[in-house]
Amino acid sequence: MLKKNTIYLLFIIFLTFTSYLFGARPQNELNIYSGRKLSLIEPLIKKFENDTNIKINIITGKSDAFIERLKLEGLNSPADILLTTDVARLFRAKENNLFRSIDSEILRKNIPKKYRSKDNYWFGFSVRARPIIYSNSRVDQRDLSTYEDLSNNKWKSRICMRSSNNVYNQSLIASLIINLGIKRTEEWMEGLVKNFARRPYGGDRDQIRAVASGECDISIINTYYLANMLNSKNKSDKKAAEKVSIFWPNQQTNGTHVNISGAGIMKGSKNLHNAIKFLEFLSTKESQEIYTKKMHEYSIREDVYPSTTVSSFGTFIVDDLELDKLSSKIKQPIYLASKKKWR
């Protein structure tokens, strides 16, 4: 007959083995796939870890690659949260059945309806506007008015844009489809493409550099990039940013297009309680002040003000379109851009 101590030891081994098989994890951790650079979100992560004693394991990379990875991993994914930028990516993750709906009174209270999905699958945590930028030396601000006016022949060979494959542009086009209708948006796109100074390439920072260098006179960028270049230790980038200014388009019509950075909790999250706690933490006033002061983005909260740099851009009327509605049109811009040869 086995002794009691031997039976107890075998029982412990059995529990350990079955825990291993079923992927048991320490309760005080959280696993994040982040499409945002670690340097940007590290202050938030450190504060959350210090406040809660929950260890965050984070992998950073390209958001679109993470979505494909999560599709392959399915419910076996170690990820609890996907952090990303632009509602188009959040919509894509939801459409691929990656997120789970979250019932949180704190998130509903802190995040305006227009910055979260109507069924609580994803939530916005910072806002970035996408206005027009122009050369201080070659463009008279009085000649600017709306996004639609950029198709006017007076801007022939004066506009630089990044590729239509970029989600920021896809979301902007989707907003125009909702506000103008698909026929007018097609006409706008056709005129815009004719006004390109060169073939689209590069990111938003590249468009700022192109305007500053004289390669073109106008572009459309996210404010976040200009603010960070203005505060850059790279003297060349800072000098380029100082040669351009922001113009807030459509102030007499539907307002300037805005988008978000946001997150959702994975359907197979093994640390659900910690994941919800982290998203709720991101929506607090203290966390939002980190978003605005360290990252130069706009807050989702009315009681948190922009950084000094972003405040210098001035106030503007925001397109009040609910981003959940925007996401429903996100496939159409890809077709239109191909049809109108916006590469």
Image (cartoon, helix red, strand yellow):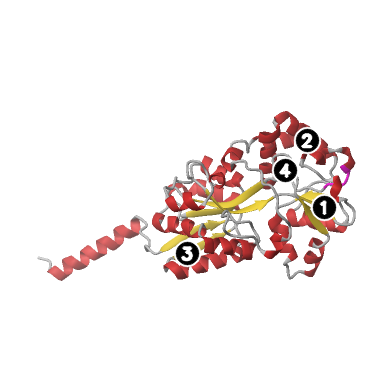
In magenta, the rendered stretch is 155-159
The amino acid on which the numbered mark 1 sits, given as a three-letter code, is Tyr
Q: CA distance from mark 2 to mark 1?
A: 19 Å
The residue carrying mark 1 is 134
The residue carrying mark 3 is 56
Q: Earlier in the sequence, mark 2 or mark 1?
A: 1
User: Mark 2 or mark 4, which is nearer to you?
Assistant: 2
x and y, in percent, of residue 188 in the image: 78, 35
Q: Say if mark 2 contacts mark 3, CB within 8 Å.
A: no
- Which residue is depicted at the point 50% across and 59% down? 284
Count of picture labels:
4
- Tell me where residue 251 sits by quadrant: top right
Tell me the crowding category of disc 1: few under 14, some 14 to 19, or many 20 or more residues within 10 angstroms, Cα based. Answer: many
| Viewer-side residue, 234 vs 134 | 134
Which type of secondary structure does the marked residue at label 2 adopt?
helix
The residue carrying mark 2 is 188
Q: CA distance from mark 1 to mark 3?
A: 41 Å
- Rendered position, 270 above or below 56: above
Q: CA distance from mark 2 to mark 3?
A: 46 Å
User: Mark 1 or mark 3, which is nearer to you?
Assistant: 1
Please identify the residue farthest to the left as the structure is shown: 1
- Whether residue 196 is visible here, answered yes or no, is yes
Q: Say if mark 1 contacts mark 3, CB within 8 Å.
A: no
Q: Is residue 194 left or right of residue 77?
A: right
The amino acid on which the numbered mark 4 sits, given as a three-letter code, is Ser
Q: Is residue 254 left or right of residue 57?
A: right
Please identify the residue farthest to the top as the structure is shown: 183
Q: Earlier in the sequence, mark 1 or mark 3?
A: 3
